[in-house]
Image (tube, rainbow, N blue to C red):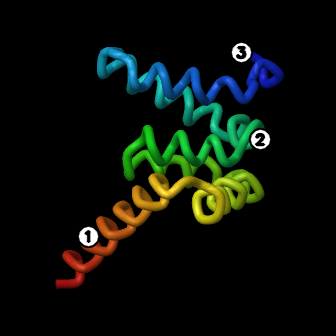
Amino acid sequence: MRDSDLTPDIFNYISELLNSNLAPEDIRRLKSATLKRLPELVEVDNVATARLIVISFDGNEHQQVMDVLEKHPQLQFQYLNSIIAKTPRQVRRCLNNLNNRSQSNDNARTH
């Protein structure tokens, strides 16, 4: 797939695949491929990328997203901005849960 092949429809496609009856190994491969193409996905639609990652990936994978986008500071900013300002309530709730989990882990380490 070339960069020009990515359209906004890719987000529905990935989401539908992740919610289908794929084998766990196939889901892992799909998530890995998604993370590899993350900079291109953010360029196609940063809000849809944030929504896809937060809803379909777990907290550990969010850290991988941040690591991948670290090499692309403007894309990382767009991704974070989308999470904070433009995503639906469900995504915010998910992020709050991730934040609470992170704070719990931090508290456990300090005690």
Q: Tell me if 64 is positioned left or right of 7 in this view.
A: left
In the rendered structure, find residue 30 and report the number of the disc placed on it: none
Q: Tell me if 106 is positioned left or right of 75 in this view.
A: left
Residue 46, horizontal then vertical, whole percent: 70, 46
Secondary structure category for the residue under label 1: helix
The CA distance from mark 3 to mark 2 is 16 Å
User: Considering the image in quadrants, where does the N terminus appear?
Assistant: top right
Which sits in the foreground, 85 or 78?
A: 85
Give the residue type at disc 3: Met
Residue 53, horizontal then vertical, whole percent: 51, 43
Which sits in the foreground, 78 or 93?
A: 93
Residue under the image location 67 percent in, 62 percent down: 81
Furthest residue in direction bottom, as rendered:
111
Q: Tell me if 11 is positioned left or right of 103 in this view.
A: right
The residue carrying pointer 2 sits among few (fewer than 14), some (14 to 19) or many (20 or more) residues within 10 Å by Cα, namely: some
Residue identifier under label 2: 43
Residue identifier under label 1: 105
Residue under the image location 55 percent in, 45 percent down: 51
Indicate which label's residue lies in the foreground, 3 or 2: 2
Q: Is residue 58 above or below residue 16?
A: below
Residue identifier under label 3: 1
Residue under the image location 32 percent in, 74 percent down: 103
The CA distance from mark 1 to mark 3 is 39 Å
Q: Quadrant of residue 77?
A: bottom right
Residue under the image location 42 percent in, 41 percent down: 57
Give the residue type at disc 2: Glu
Indicate which label's residue lies in the foreground, 2 or 1: 2
Q: Is residue 19 above or below residue 72?
A: above
Secondary structure category for the residue under label 3: loop
First in sequence: mark 3 vs mark 2: 3
